[in-house]
Image: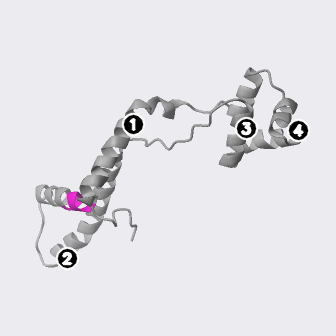
Amino acid sequence: MLRDKRAQSRRRLDQRFDRHGDLADLAPPPQGWIRTLREALGMSGGDLARRMGVHPSRISAIERGEREQTLKLDTLTRVADAMQCELVYALIPRTSLDGIVADQSRRRAVRHLRNVIAHSRLEDQEVTPDDLEAQIEDVAFEFRSRRDLWRTD
């Protein structure tokens, strides 16, 4: 039951990400979004500082923090409000969530089966490549629903 809910949740999210996938291609401009938008609006650093209620030197620090990826989200939200913008924050998967889970479950299955294969060789029980692939797929399917899928031990 829980596995079905997780799979349904992944599918719903994948559908949402498919609709907004082009957002992942939206790389920040070299100067950062804050400075780029501020200049496009014709707003000086001093103007933005007054709108935010901060010292003008803080704007340079904020813009540098954005470029260095050290800016806090609450600061970015305040900047967006002062510039009459909306902050959109999202983690966009590089592939589908189901694909990520399938890849991870396969990695876990291979890691798990390495030990089994090593013991089989010690007992002179060789596994054919076709049998091994079938075992990997079976074990990977089982790992998909396990809570320890992402454990690294």
- Residue for badge 4: 56
Q: Are marks 1 and 4 in contact (CB under 8 Å)?
A: no
* Alpha carbons under labels 4 and 3: distance apart: 13 Å
Q: Earlier in the sequence, mark 1 or mark 4?
A: 1
Res 15 quadrant in image: top left
Amino acid under disc 1: Arg
Left or right side of 75 for 148 = left
Q: Earlier in the sequence, mark 4 or mark 2?
A: 4
Which is in the foreground here, disc 3 or disc 2? 3
User: Residue 64, how many percent across, how many down?
Assistant: 76, 41
Left or right side of 150 for 29 = right
Res 107 quadrant in image: bottom left
Callout 3 secondary element: helix
**Residues packed near mark 2 inside 10 Å, few (<14), some (14 to 19) or many (20 plus):** few
Q: Earlier in the sequence, mark 1 or mark 3?
A: 1
Callout 2 secondary element: helix
Disc number at residue 16?
A: 1
